[in-house]
Amino acid sequence: MIPKALFDQTLLGFFGPVRRYLEEDGITEVMINGPFDVYIEKRGKIEKTDARFAGVEELMSALRNVAQYVGRPLDEERPVLEAHLPDGSRLEAIIPPAAAGGPYVSIRRFYREKLTAERLIELGSITPEAMTLLRGLVACKQNILIAGGTNSGKTSLLNVMSTFCFPEERIVVIEDARELQLNAEHVVRLESQPGDYKGRGAISIRKLFHAALRMRPDRIVVGEVRGPEALDLIQAMTSGHGGCLSTVHASSARDATGRIETLALMSDIGLPLAALRPQIASAINFVVNVNRLQDGQRCVTSIAEIVGHDSEQGYVIHELFTSDYRRDAATGRCESKLRPTGLQPRCAAQICDL
């Protein structure tokens, strides 16, 4: 049997043309558009590199080895691969025939440095006052969605917020692919699995969610809500499982509620929208928005409380923190100032009692 450390190094060796970018600090994404076009994202900016694979077969060989490493299929019938490299980087690959001109590969690298609340404040991603509020909301077990676009820092913020959980809490984490690096002691990790070419053996997020409810969780963390499991999450939140944390692709608190609506309607329950909306308003207590600015900075831009739903006005949302933007035309630097609006969360008394 080949030792794991040796196999890991061999696997990374197949990515020889781009390996230096997988090890260089400051690079957050490596994008391979076929064997001859390689781009990187460095400190928020995309740059073209001179890296090249010898040809399609060399790149495909690397991807086949990754598929073998994670035990997932990759062929013409199943042309999409989601996996993690030995260093923790997340890989997404699409091969022909689904990718004309491919294979296309995107490798997301995560910070080697463990981000902390203090480090995010130092980076200017959030203010001390806003971080104090998030600490209190997590501690008093409010249900929180972190919303933002691709590569906006949702996962990083979720990792930091996990440090605000009490050490004795049992946290059940559910993900499509392992990304979260929760800084907590008692963590149970569940990961969905694709089926074979006939669909056999598939384990969905929804199935894992149902199992998680029977595993005595103090908190449930869903890496990203992007399917009908949204309805299961809502029902868990409204049935006594407080302190749930998750992320969703959305650009504001109102967009996040609309996105959850759409995903919940994808379930096979057939719940009327008029009945679903009050449940969402009751389930989700807060939405934290993160955004990647034009210069590549990642910032918290809003903290909003969902206080209810009105049949005429829709979701009633109170912004507790909001941002003012300014871009320096000379330097191109963006500045996002997160400021309190003066409104207090309804759970303010609970936070003060902690």
Image: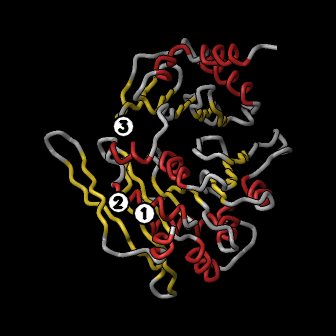
Q: Which quadrant of the figure has residue 140?
A: bottom right
Q: Residue at x 75, y 32 (%)?
A: 73
Amino acid type at image mark 1 = Leu
- Label 2–label 1 contact, CB within 8 A: yes
Is there any visible trace of residue 9 in the rendered image?
yes
Q: Position of residue 54 (x, y in %)?
A: 54, 11
* The N terminus: image quadrant: top right
Q: Quadrant of residue 141?
A: bottom right
Contact (CB < 8 A) between labels 3 and 2? no
- Label at residue 44: 3
Circle 1 or circle 3, nearest the eye: 1
Secondary structure type for disc 1: helix
Q: Of label 1 and label 3, which has the lower sequence position?
A: 3
Name the residue carrying label 1: 133
Q: For this rendering, which residue is in front, 56 or 182?
A: 182
124 relative to 55 in the view: left or right:
left
Residue occupying image coordinates x 70% and y 77%: 271
Residue ID for mark 2: 129
Identify which amino acid the numbered label 2 is placed on: Glu
Q: Bin the neighbour count of mark 1 within 10 Å (Cα to Cα): few under 14, some 14-19, many 20 and up.
A: some
Can you tell which mark lies on residue 225? Answer: none
Percent of width and height locating residue 17: 51, 15
**Mark 3 vs 2, N-terminal side:** 3
Task: Give the spatial CA distance, label 2 vs label 1.
Answer: 6 Å
State the image quarter where residue 183 is shown: top right
Residue 44 lies, with reference to residue 154, above or below; the image says above
Q: Nearer the viewer, residue 76 or 217?
A: 217
Query: Can you name the residue that lies furthest to the bottom here?
Result: 312
Above/below status of 289 relative to 200: below
Q: CA distance from mark 1 to mark 3?
A: 28 Å
Residue 213 in the image, given as x and y percentages of width and height: 76, 62
